[in-house]
Amino acid sequence: MKIDWRTVGAFQENSYLVVDPSTQRAALVDPGADAEQLVEMVRASRATLEAIWLTHAHIDHIGAIAGIKRIWDVPVHMHPADRPLFDRGAMQAAVYGLPFEEPPAPERELAEGDILQLGALRFGVLHMPGHAPGHVVFVTDGHMIGGDLLFAGSIGRTDLPFSDPDRMSESLERVIMLPDETVVYPGHGPTTAIGHERSTNPFLTGVARVVRR
């Protein structure tokens, strides 16, 4: 598996390109902003883009969808519980004074236990709500593309509209059951690993608490 990414937009969000080297088929995860940069990344890979996968539908993870789909009309996969957030994309952007081009509606629904095939690669879909109601992560062979669930030394916010601190706590309890060596590709910040976060992340060791509104 090859994973490349660009850190884009006002929120410095990580947009990932996942490529199966045996077939050169690719998926773009969370195209958040700066569509031109992401188009360049896909083209430089020489891979065939097959899909857009969303961990969740906050503005900083969906802002480049329209620009990507003008070049490659590939299906967008998203958990349906995040549709209210997706449909409020323009409203989210207005709050932060950001430009936003309305994307077409997602074509495919994700659910807990789904398997996404990308060439020879298989990714399991785990529904991990809390930061957003439809937040999911994509897991394969010691790697997790985790969106805004778990960061290096921190976790996703739970004081936003539609977030749920109790469900976030449950999701964190689930994610730390993954093997220690699982590499985490988060929505913001550097990569990390489950074992490292389990032993050092203050939200997992009990030093810090999940924020409640």
Image (cartoon, rainbow, N blue to C red):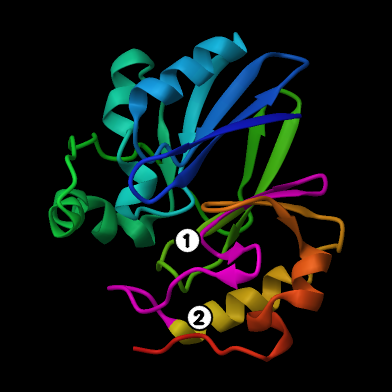
User: Is residue 56 positioned above or below 194 on the image?
Assistant: above
User: Where are the magenta residues, as a range?
Assistant: 138-164
Q: Quadrant of residue 176?
A: bottom right
Whether label 2 touches label 1, CB < 8 Å: no
Kindly identify which numbered label has been placed on residue 206. Answer: none
- Name the residue that disc number 1 marks: 135
User: Is residue 59 positioned above or below 47 on the image?
Assistant: below
- 24 horizontally vs 48: left or right: right
Residue 142 placed where, x, y %? 82, 49
Residue 86 placed where, x, y %? 27, 51
**Residue drawn at the location 15% of the way across and 49% of the way down:** 90
Q: Of the residues shown, which amino acid type is indicated by label 2?
A: Arg
Please count the marks in the image.
Answer: 2
Under circle 2, the secondary element is: helix
Say whether disc 2 or disc 1 marks the residue closer to the N-terminus: 1
Q: Nearer the viewer, residue 168 or 118?
A: 168
Q: Of the residues shown, which amino acid type is indicated by label 1?
A: His
User: Magenta span has 157?
Assistant: yes
Residue 118 placed where, x, y %? 65, 28
Could you tell me if residue 47 is visible in this image?
A: no
Q: Nearer the viewer, residue 147 or 37?
A: 37
Q: Quadrant of residue 175?
A: bottom right
Q: Quadrant of residue 163?
A: bottom left
**Residue drawn at the location 64% of the way across and 51% of the way down:** 190
**Residue drawn at the location 33% of the way across and 88% of the way down:** 213
Determine crowd level at label 2: few under 14, some 14-19, many 20+ residues with C-alpha closer than 10 A: some
Could you tell me if residue 84 is visible in this image?
A: yes
Quadrant where the N terminus sits is top right
- Name the residue that disc number 2 marks: 167
